[in-house]
Image (spheres, rainbow, N blue to C red):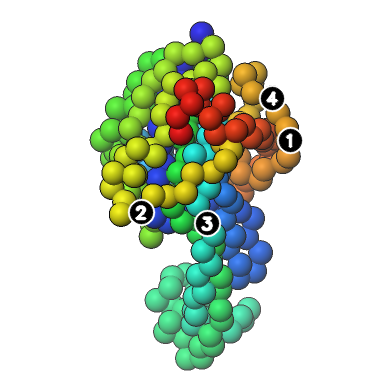
Amino acid sequence: MKHYLLLRLYGPMASWGDTAVGDFRPSHSHPSRTAVLGLLAAALGIRRNEEDKLLWLDQMVNVAIRLDLTGEMLRDYHTIQVPPESKKNRYYTRADELNSEKLHTIISQRDYRTDSAASVALYSHENDKTVLEQWQTALRKPALPLYLGRKSCPLALPVDPVIIEADNLKSAFDGYPDCSTQLDALCHHRIPKPDSVQYYWEGEDAGLISQMSYPRHDRLQSRKRWQFSTRIEYYAAYPAVAAHGSGKE
C-alpha cells in the first residue's frame, strides 16, 4: 500500500503555462508539474530564489492529475509599452523600461482555462507519510498566497488536502470525490460535466491503462535561470461513471 496526498484545484480562471514563444503565452488544459510544485512550495513558505529547496521538492515527489472539469479556453489580449531593443541600454526593472525616452506598443496574448477543476495526487518516492503530513498541514494553512498558475487566478474553493492509503493511483483518486456537489450548491447554474474523466501521471504503475504518452517540458532544472527539463507524461480517459466507480459524477 502507498500513501497519497490528494487535493483539489478550482477557480474561475487558471493558467497552466506551456512553452512560450514570442508574445504568446499558451495554457495547457490541466495543471503542469511546475505549477503544482510551485503551489506546494508557496504553502511551505519556499520563495522563488531558494533554488536548493525548490530542487529538493522537485526530486521528492511525483505528481498525478485527474481532470474533473475541462472548462473552456479564454484568450486575453494585452497591450504593453516597451522600449526598443538596444545593446547600449539595459533595463533592470519595469520602471527602467517605462522611463525610457522612446516607447512603442506590442500586443501579447495570454490563454486561461475558465471553470476547470482538477484533483491532484502527490506521492513521495520513498512512500514517506510523515512528509505528506507536513505538506498537508502547510496546504491547510499556507505560508504564502496560493494561486492557479498566475497571481490573477485565485482559488475559489479550499484545496481540501487528504491523505489516502491505496494500492495505486486509480484507487486513491476513486477515494477522493470531485468538487461537483460543492459547485452546484454555490453556482446559480450547473457547470456542464464532461462525458469522460482524464488522468495524467508519471513514473509508476498507476492502475490505469495508458492510452498515450508524450514529453512535457515542465520539470524544474534551474529556477534562477528559468530552465526546465523534459519528462514523460502518461494519459488515459475513462467514462465519467466508470471513472468514479459509484455511478455518481
Tell me the SS state at disc 1: strand
Q: Which mark is residue 212?
A: 1
Mark 3 and mark 4 lie on one chain; the one further toward the N terminus is 3
Of callouts 3 and 1, the N-terminal one: 3
Task: Depth check: give the residue in front, 121 or 221.
Answer: 121
Near mark 1 (Cα within 10 A), the count class, few <14, some 14-19 or many ≥20, is few
Disc number lying in front (3 or 1): 3
4 or 2: tag closer to the N-terminus:
2
Which-is-in-front pick, marks 3 and 2?
Answer: 2
Q: Residues within 10 Å of mark 3 (few under 14, many from 20)?
A: few
Report whether 49 appears left or right of 137.
Answer: right
Q: Which mark identifies residue 72? A: 3
x 49%, y 39%: residue:
68
Q: Secondary structure at mark 4?
A: loop
Camera-side residue of 222 and 30: 30
Task: Please report whichever mark, 2 or 1, sits nearer to the chain's N-terminal start.
Answer: 2
Residue at the disc numbered 2: 189
Q: Label 4 to label 2, Cα distance in Å?
A: 34 Å
Seen in the picture, residue 146 relative to 130 is either above or below; the reply is below
